[in-house]
Structure formats: C-alpha cells, structure tokens
Image (cartoon, rainbow, N blue to C red):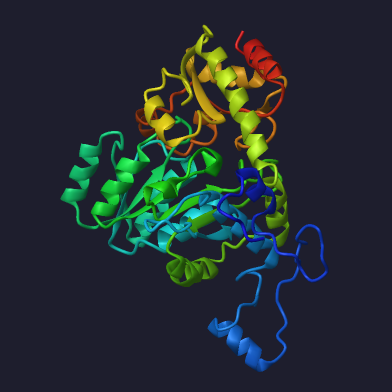
Amino acid sequence: MKIETSTGFDTVCIRGGHVTEGHRAHLTPIYASSTYVFESAEQAISVFKGDEKGYVYSRWGNPTITEAEEKIALLEAYKLTNSNGTPLQLKAILHASGMAAVTTMLLGNIKYGQKLITHQSLYGGTHELIEKILPGLGIQSIIVDFHDINKVEDALKADGNIGLMYLETPANPTLQCIDLEALSSLGKSYGLTVCVDNTFATPYLQQPFRYDVDYVMHSTTKFLNGHGTAIGGVVIGRDIEKMEGPMTKTHRLLGGNSNPFDAFLLTNGLKTFGIRMERHCSNAAKVAAFLEQHPAVGTVNYLGLASHPDHATAMRQMKNGGAMMSFELKDGFDAGVSFINKLKMCTNAVSLGTCDTLVSHAPSTTHMGVDRQQRLAFGITDGLIRMSVGMENVEDIISDLDQAMK
C-alpha cells in the first residue's frame, strides 16, 4: 500500500507495506517456497541482472519477508524528510536475528585494519561480538564514555583508522541514554559511518534517522513482534543504492536471512505495535515511580524519572521514558537471585518487549560473559535487575514486585 505523508502512525503499522497478492488474500500469506519459477531463460537472466524485479531464492528475498521489511522502513522514516523537503526513503533487510543484522551491518561497512568506536554498557551479545570475534578479523574497537563529547573527539583525532561509530541508546541494561544529535554530527564530521541499535526505544519512541545516522538496527524479536513468537532482526539504511547493492550482497553471502513464517508473525505483531507501546510505556512510568521509593531499591534506571542523569537528553530525543528499566537491589547478587525466585506473576526470562512483564538478573544471565570488573565499570552491578514492563494491569505488576522484595 502506498502511504501518504499525512497517514497516521497506527495506520502505517496496520497497512504499510501491504500489496494485494494474486489470490486477493486479506493478509499476505506465508510463502513457504525455497525457490521461484521463471517463464523463460531470458526472464531468469533479466531477474538475475536486476533488470526485472522478481524473486529468485528465499535466502535472497520472499514476498512475506518483503512486507515486514517495507513496514519497518516506513515506521523508521515516519514523517521524516530529506534536506530538500522530500519524504525520507529507507531500505530494510530482515534477518534471522538481531545479531545477524548487526553482523551484516558491521561486516558490510568496516574492513580489516579499521576500527570502530563505541561506548560502555552495550547489549552483552554485541559487546562479545566486538570484543571476541571482530579482533580475529583484524577489526579493533575503542570504548569511550560517549557522555563526554570531548573524549570522543579526542579519540577520533588520535586515530585515523576509526571508520564506524556504534551507538546503542537507550543502552542495555543500564538505560544509559546518549545524545544522538551531537554524536552523529561529530561522527559524520570525521567521515564515520554512524549506526544505532534502536531496539529498546523502537521507532514509536525515537527515530535516529532524524539525526542523519546511516543505519538503524533492531532485534525484531522484541517490541516490534511483541508476542515472543519469532526471532528476527533488521538493518535499515538511508543509502538505498548501497543497501540494494553491497549490503544486500553481504547479507546474502553471510546467510543470516529471515524466513517466511517468522516474517508473517512479525508483520501481524506490528499491526498492534503503536497501541501496545502506549500501554507498555504508561505501565512502566507507574512501576518506576513505585520502585524509586521502595526501601529495598538503591537505584532505578528509568529515563522517564527526573532522577536519571540522562533524563533531559532522553526527553529531547524520545517520546517518553519508554517501557524498559533496570533497578539495583541494595543487598547485591544474593538479593537479585532471591528476588527472581520469589516472583509469582512476572516472568523470569531474558528477552523483552512481550505483552507480559519479563524480569531478569543481568549479572547472572545476559551479561554473564562480560568480565566482572568491566561489567561493574559499565554500571552493571551485582544486584541489577532488568525489567521489560508488560501490559498487565499495573497494580498486579507492582504487587508482585513488592512481595518479591520483602
């Protein structure tokens, strides 16, 4: 469906990217076919050369996958324009997981001998990829406090081999929020490729392309799908020619493609994305206010609270405080484990973005693979609890948290 610039966000969630197929199915079907038939040898040549649009092999593309890709691209570009005032056009490539999307983006943009610059408190999987896999490919990383723009610029001045800036805001699990506008502007002034993991915020809360970044990634498993039914990831880019050329080639050769069934589940989850986020965020604000005054809690990391050191930055670039938070229990690691074991309703699981509230003890799960001293330096303390606030009645969420901390 062609989306007009005046179309509302929820309408894009429901109708964006949909094309009526030949049998007039209401919803785009699951195209469970590994390959596609050509009418002639000449047509095959034309499609392979790119002169004619068409599907070849489902690792390369699939109609069910295409709808999910186009819907997400429309949401990240929602009401954004180019410098000449024309609507911003983006290209999305759906992947088998968020890590597959991150890998395609990194290997498609940074080469042997180059470096990337990033910050503290990234998602544990991303941190391990950067620290444990990329060095073996001749790609080193520099970790700097991105709250200090002068330190970032000093690092860029000191090393001409830095080619990419990797941002994650809000960061997992400390909810650190960094200034997208300032950092993107600085990165671009030094010729860097700038990319942002937007999983925690989603395009409902934040649109990094507003700040001239080059790429945005998501784990679509999380809020975009919203129901915990399918693993997926996506990389979205503003350079359409590069996305349809080198980035598509990198994606296809790495083989981290999505599949029709997961894409179907993602597309249907996206239909309720806007309305779900309203409830997630409303509940989270109330839960954070409760936790902030609880005697068992030392610190609450929620961007909607004025007490969060990054509150002002978040309110400039996000719609509200979001649905994610973490909080530190005063009695450390043992208190974190005890709290998890006492929960009666909230779900002990390491993912996020589902309709039910998910709670995890970060030091013993998602960030177990991060060196303890490094983890503590990043603010991931021994008693840190990460929470994805769900859509249950908020009174029930608060009641369960309260009894588990007694």
- How many marks overall? 0
Screen quadrant of the C terminus: top right
Residue at left offset 41%, top offset 58%? 106
Image x and y of residue 322, in percent: 53, 31
Give the quarter of the image for residue 119. top left
Answer above or below: position of 383 versus 95.
above
For the residue pair 360 and 285, the one nearer the viewer reads as 285
Residue at left offset 48%, top offset 40%? 206
Q: Is residue 77 visible?
A: yes
Image x and y of residue 43, in percent: 65, 88
Image x and y of residue 182, in percent: 30, 41
Answer above or below: position of 127 versus 259.
above
For the residue pair 96 and 321, the one nearer the viewer reads as 321
For the residue pair 9 and 67, the one nearer the viewer reads as 9
Residue at left offset 42%, top offset 31%? 314
For the residue pair 93 and 213, the one nearer the viewer reads as 213
Answer above or below: position of 81 versus 352.
below
Q: Can residue 384 be seen in this view?
A: no
Relative to 396, 327 lies left or right: left
Screen quadrant of the N terminus: bottom right
Relative to 119, 397 lies left or right: right
Relative to 192, 127 lies left or right: right
Relative to 183, 12 lies left or right: right
Image x and y of residue 188, in percent: 29, 53
